[in-house]
Image (cartoon, helix red, strand yellow):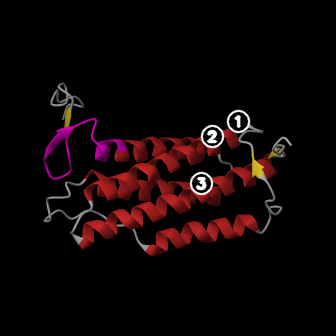
C-alpha cells in the first residue's frame, strides 16, 4: 500500500465510514489536533526517565488514538463501531494526578511555563490538549447529535481531554521538582 493516494489533492478527506468532507471542517480540525497532541505526548515519553510515567504516557497515546477514532467517525453512519473510552480511563489520570500532588507543594499561584525544556514540552502538550478540548466542545455543540451513543462518545472524549490537561499540568510541576528546575510563580503587578 502506498502512503500517498492523491485523493486529498483537492482539499477533501474521508471520515471513518467513507463520507468525503473538506479538510477544513471542524471535525477534521478536532481529530487533527488530537493527533498533534499525541505527537507531543510521544516527545514527553521519549524524554521521561521514570518508567511508570513512560508507561502511563504510552497508555495515554493509546487512548488518544481511541479518542481520535471517535472524532474521525462519520456521525451519520450509525453502523460504525469505534473503540470507546471508559470512566476508568479518566480515573487512571485522576489517580496519577493525586499521586503526584502528594509530593508537590500546594499551588498558591499560577505557574509560568518553563524552567527546563522538558517542563516546557509538558506545557506545550497541555495547551494543545486544551485546544483539542475546545474544538471537541465546538464540534459537539455544532452537530448537536440526537444519537445518544454518539453524544456520549464525544462527551466522554471532552471529559478525558479536560482531565488530561490537568494531568499534563501536574506532570509539568512534578518534572520541574524532579529536575530541580525553578517553578516561577506568576505574581501580577500591583
113 or 40, nearer to the observer: 113
Residue at the disc numbered 2: 121
Q: For the residue labelled by badge 1, is the local secondary structure a helix, a strand or a loop? A: helix
Q: For the residue labelled by badge 3, is the local secondary structure a helix, a strand or a loop? A: helix
What residue is rendered at 59% in x and 41% in y?
Answer: 124
Residue at the disc numbered 3: 54
Mark 3 or mark 2: which is in front? 2
Q: Which mark is residue 117?
A: 1
* Mark 2 vs 1: CB contact within 8 A: yes
Mark nearer the N terminus (1 vs 3):
3
The quarter of the picture where residue 171 lies is: bottom right
* Mark 3 vs 2: CB contact within 8 A: no
What residue is rendered at 78% in x and 39% in y?
Answer: 115
Give me the C-alpha separation between circle 3 and circle 2: 14 Å
170 or 54, nearer to the observer: 170
Please state the horizontal and vertical placement of residue 25, each as a whole percent of the image.
Answer: 27, 41
Q: Is residue 19 magenta?
A: yes
Amino acid at each position: 500500500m502506498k502512503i500517498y493516494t492523491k485523493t486529498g489533492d483537492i482539499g477533501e478527506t474521508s471520515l471513518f465510514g467513507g463520507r468525503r468532507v473538506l479538510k477544513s471542517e471542524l471535525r477534521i480540525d478536532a481529530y487533527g489536533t488530537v493527533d498533534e497532541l499525541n505527537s507531543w505526548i510521544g516527545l514527553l515519553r521519549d524524554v521521561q526517565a521514570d518508567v511508570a510515567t513512560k508507561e502511563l504516557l504510552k497508555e495515554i497515546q493509546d487512548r488518544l488514538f481511541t479518542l481520535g477514532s471517535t472524532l474521525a467517525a462519520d456521525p451519520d453512519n450509525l453502523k460504525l463501531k469505534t473503540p470507546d473510552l471508559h470512566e476508568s480511563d479518566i480515573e487512571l489520570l485522576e489517580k496519577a494526578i493525586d499521586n503526584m500532588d502528594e509530593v508537590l507543594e500546594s499551588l498558591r499561584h499560577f505557574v509560568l511555563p518553563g524552567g527546563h525544556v522538558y517542563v516546557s514540552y509538558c506545557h506545550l502538550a497541555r495547551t494543545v490538549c486544551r485546544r483539542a478540548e475546545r474544538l471537541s466542545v465546538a464540534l459537539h455543540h455544532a452537530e448537536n447529535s440526537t444519537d445518544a451513543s454518539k453524544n456520549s462518545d464525544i462527551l466522554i472524549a471532552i471529559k478525558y481531554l479536560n482531565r488530561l490537561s490537568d494531568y499534563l499540568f501536574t506532570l509539568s510541576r512534578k518534572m520541574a521538582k524532579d529536575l530541580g528546575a525553578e517553578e516561577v510563580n506568576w505574581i501580577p503587578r500591583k
